[in-house]
Image (tube, rainbow, N blue to C red):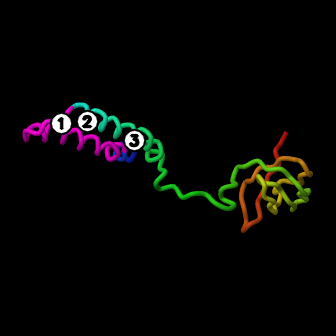
Amino acid sequence: MNLGRIARLLLLSADELVVGVFLLLILPSLGIKVPLAVTVPLLAFLIIKDLLVAPYVLKGGLERRPLTGPEALMGLEVVVVEDLAPEGIVRVGNELWRGVCINGKAKRGEKVRVVGFRGNLLLLERQES
């Protein structure tokens, strides 16, 4: 684990540490007894919350921009609808996109991979057999 992830994990678990110290050390030293029936479920809830959130936070989900438009199509395998000779139409999910085959021609029904884009024109590559 790199230093950034360790720091994020510590920050993510800071609330458990603070609540635990407060409920188990500070309040009892002031004469206020908090029952374990309250302390344990509260700490368990905070730990479960962190277990659910940690994968998103540690994988950089907060910094990553959502992919939309042609960027989201990079690497997808799509089906040729209109022969790519070298330009034609491909089906991406339920959408039709204009594309150009950068390594030859592709016939209708063939699968090609999205390797880039130029404006709204997809750059496609034939799959080598």
Give the residue at x 38% y 47%.
4
Residue at disc 1, secondary structure: loop
Q: In this rendering, would 20 be left or right of 62?
A: left
Q: How many numbered marks have been drawn onto this rendered protein structure?
A: 3
Query: Residue 29 at x, y = what percent?
Result: 8, 38
Secondary element at tag 2? helix
Queried whether the magenta region covers residue 16, the answer comes back as: yes
User: Looking at the rendering, in which quadrant would you find the N terminus?
Assistant: top left
State the separation of the CA atoms marked 2 and 3: 17 Å
Q: Which residue is mark 3?
A: 49
Amino acid type shown at disc 3? Lys
Q: Residues within 10 Å of mark 3 (few under 14, many from 20)?
A: few
Region in magenta: 9-35
Q: Which mark is residue 38?
A: 2
Q: Main secondary structure of the magenta part?
A: helix
- Residue 34's disc number: 1
